[in-house]
Image (cartoon, rainbow, N blue to C red):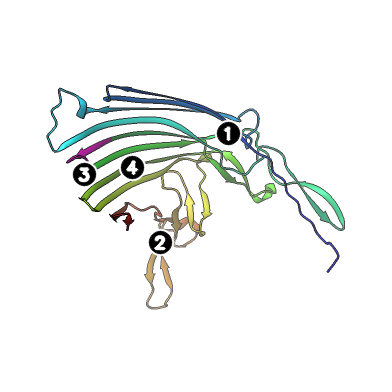
Amino acid sequence: AATIVSAYANGLDEGTESFFGRINYNYANKYIASFSGRGDASSRFGSNNQWGFFPSASVAWRLGEEDFLKLPDQLNELKIRTSFGLTGNDDITPFLYKELFGITTYDGKSGYYPTGIPNPDLKWETTAQFNVGIDLGMYQNRVTLTLDYYNKQTKDLLLARPLPGSSGYSSITENIGKVENKGLELNLTTVNIDKALNWTTTINLSANRNKVKKLYNGEPIDDIGRGSNRVMEGEPIGVFYNYKWLGIDPSTGDVVYADPNKNGVVDSEDRLVVGDPHPDLIGGITNVLSYKGFDL
């Protein structure tokens, strides 16, 4: 037991460098604008693609402050706003752009072997998002309502593309594919009681629609998650891709599956999209009660 038969050590040095700036402008508390830009460099990419530039801009118009627009007494705040911006993602294992080697032994002799296929062209994954919304305040902001529409387009996805086993490797990380996320978000807050006892209710509701718009040569990525999920063009990420269950044959007790291509044999070509892991709606209700320093 005192004989050392194996040893392991690991070291990692990585970093991010960023420059950013922002300009805010407010005229008469009616017209509000913000502009920002940032440049990020990540050691997870090669020297030719380390830097990414991500600008953004937003503007808002408080219509309730305009003299020509006479709001009802019950409505004390009315604001419309819009924004557009880019963000970057570098969430991958470090040094995938380099040719890395591991150490192994065979027949009592040690040696080196390549642990993966290098990709010096790796670069930032980028998401462009457009947003437009409206804010309402009623009864001296005892009731506030926020409604937003957003559209997010992500390109140059950092994904592990499957490789044939004959290559000696199972996958290579590349910038492949495009994904879309768009939807609506609603937030309603009411101050029900505002005295020694304070009671506030917040209701939120959102609906997001996700779709894979492009993959490498249109090739789907199979058997992810729990084994029957797939990433494929034209469908949400991670759809359930399997055989369609039709029931039980009462005469044999066997499971009966659909044969969509009508060739008389149920095989892998008969698999299809049988479910979507993404919910149609997400919502919640929060109540906050407070009384003399105590809250629930």
Is 292 left, or right, of 40 in this rendering?
left
Q: Type of residue at label 1? A: Lys
Query: Mark 1 or mark 2, which has the lower sequence index?
Result: 1
Q: Type of residue at label 4? A: Gly
Q: Which mark is residue 123?
A: 1
Query: Mark 4 or mark 2, which has the lower sequence index?
Result: 4
Q: Residue under label 3, please give it.
A: 143
> How far across and down, in percent of the image, does residue 193 sit?
20, 52
* Mark 4 vs mark 2: in front: 4
Question: Along the line of sight, which residue is nearer the eye, 273 or 113?
Answer: 113
* Mark 2 vs mark 3: in front: 3
CB within 8 Å, label 3 to label 4: no
Q: Quadrant of residue 174?
A: top right
Residue shown at 55% from the left, 34% from the top: 124
Question: Along the line of sight, which residue is nearer the eye, 208 or 11?
Answer: 11
Q: What separation in Å lies between label 3 and label 1 (alpha carbons)?
A: 46 Å
Q: What separation in Å lies between label 4 and label 1 (alpha carbons)?
A: 28 Å
CB within 8 Å, label 3 to label 1: no
Q: Which mark is residue 264?
A: none
Q: Quadrant of the N terminus?
A: bottom right
Q: Which mark is residue 183?
A: 4
> How far across and down, in percent of the image, does residue 57 sit?
39, 27
Query: Mark 3 or mark 4, which has the lower sequence index?
Result: 3
Is residue 271 visible in the rendered structure shown here?
Answer: no
Q: Which mark is residue 244?
A: 2
Query: Mark 3 or mark 1, which has the lower sequence index?
Result: 1
Q: Label 4: state its secondary structure.
A: strand
Read off the magenta span: 134-143
CB within 8 Å, label 1 to label 2: no
Q: What separation in Å lies between label 1 and label 2 (alpha carbons)?
A: 39 Å
Q: Label 2: state its secondary structure.
A: loop
